[in-house]
Image (cartoon, helix red, strand yellow):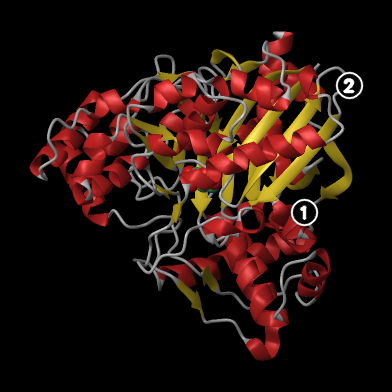
Amino acid sequence: MYVLGLELSTQSVKALVLDVDSGEIIHRQSLDYDSHLPQYKTQGGVLSSEEPGLRHTSPAMLVESLDLAFHFLQKSDVDISRIRVVKADAMQHCTVYTNKSFGNILGRLSGETPLLKQLEPAFSRATSPIWEDRTPEQEAAYLTEAIAPLGGVLALTGNPVELRFPAVQILKWAREHPEEYTETAHIFCLSAFVTSLLSGNIAPVDTGDGWGTNMNTVDIDNPGWSFPMLKIMDAYLNAHGVKHPALDRKLGVMVPYDHPLGTISPYFVDRYGLSPKTKVLAGTGDNPATLLGCGGGTVISLGSSYTVNGMASLFTAKDQEHNLFGYTPGNTMALTVFTNGAKVHDHFLNSSLKCAPSPQSWSRYLGLAGDPPLTPDENLLLPYLNPESVPCAPAGIIPGFDARDAGASIRALCLSQVLSLRLHSEHIQHADRICVVGGGAQNSLMMQWLADAFNALTYHIQTPSFAAPMGCAISGARALLGCTYEDVSIKYVRESKGSVWQPIKANVKSMEGLLTRFHELEKQHKL
Ligand code: XUL
């Protein structure tokens, strides 16, 4: 018996097949959008734009990428008919917009024709804002103020108003394009959109993604939308000439994590040979999926963005920097998102070595950064290639990349990113082991310094860059075996032998002073 985990992340589509009986990962594939779907001209999966802060992707490209993932899976050695459960995760906060034809089209998809060709008439908005977008400032100010008399957005939804969350993104778009808004029958979080394609029905959103919208309630046992929030949003839309906004009808239903949704769409049976009995589970955000893929402990993900992620009870501090999302049924998780993650390394790699990323160029790049022992006067820098979310700060690499001493800049970047992760992780308490995933987990200097800064052991799981689709596969295995999340985590999450970094005492000590210096530097450059 096999289970399939799929992921639509910012830059790529990933597929992972887990053999539930042996516990082996028998297939994993990552296809980046830029090179496999070059017709969309994306850079790192993002459409080009003149407007600063505007970061959108193409829903058509995402649909095509799903077909591509299945095409490669079909061409692999995997006996696809043995897949019993499919679950997808996606970058959080990305939204997809369709008109009322979408449900009908889904219900009669033909395996003869690619998905996109059939779905094209269903889109009511040509592009999809992603989590990196920073444009709806006017709407964020409105929501913050309008909800204040009702206790504030944080108290109602578990999160402060976030520019990247769907609430303000929807309001801005509807203000600018009221006719598109009126045409729209369904607004999906990307994970629910992909799951709709997989199940052939309009799929609900789960609490993992639904809580990342600023429109949810904080009742984890009874998932749903916050009517005070939707009412205030409708009022804004009315005030901007949008007739009959009725946002609640467009958002659909919210369900708990891993809610079973029936069987796979006949499209995937006819076109790729999946069994018609394959079950589909509710999709989720990449962060909850990553947490499960690592066994539910404390996780640092060093991907396109960097995140610090762990289970947490529901609590809201006025100045909280973290976000709260739903996790496995009845549980919540906390996460801080550092927008400027691997992208800054890509930029430095390009500036220092003038070459494209490859295993060889990365190892030369890291070689320039030197060894782990730290001194109190290490160079530090603020690594904000793009505007930063944690802490909220405008773009700026300060004091800058030094082309004459690239090694010093690369070292300062690695160290400063580690310090920033530590400084803004108050939501993670007493972690003595930290699982590090994402492409950056290959950076052994950062693995060591993370161990030093957190005074905790850092380690890898096998296939750290597939942690989220692995989390989806683990959900699938749990649904098949009917056991607990703990049981499946113990059974399937495998630590990578020999990849453990213990804190170095002298470095732990040096980190204290470096943290203070970094904090000072940060304070000089806040919004
Ligand atoms: C989470 C967030 C990012 C995206 C990356 O709130 O914005 O981690 O989920 O895909």
Residue 316 visible somewhere in the drawing = no
Taking the spot 44% from the left edge, 28% from the top edge, the residue there is 314
- The three-letter amino acid code for the residue at tag 1 is Pro
Of badges 1 and 2, the one in the foreground is 2
Q: Is mark 1 within 8 Å of ligand 1?
A: no
Where disc 1 sits, the SS reads: loop
Which residue has dot 1 on it? Answer: 503
| Residue 22 tag number | 2
Chain-order first, disc 1 or disc 2? 2
**Which residue is nearer to you in this view: 67 or 144?**
67
- The three-letter amino acid code for the residue at tag 2 is Ser
How would you rate the neighbour count of disc 1 (Cα within 10 Å): few for under 14, some for 14-19, many for 20 or more? Answer: many
Q: Position of residue 516 (x, y in %)?
A: 54, 66
Which residue is most to the front? Answer: 112
How would you rate the neighbour count of disc 2 (Cα within 10 Å): few for under 14, some for 14-19, many for 20 or more? Answer: few
Q: Please, is residue 478 above or below residue 287 in the view?
A: above
Taking the spot 83% from the left edge, 36% from the top edge, the residue there is 76
Taking the spot 66% from the left edge, 76% from the top edge, the residue there is 350
Toward which corner of the image does residue 23 lie, by quadrant? top right
Task: Give the mark count.
Answer: 2
Q: Position of residue 262 (x, y in %)?
A: 56, 11
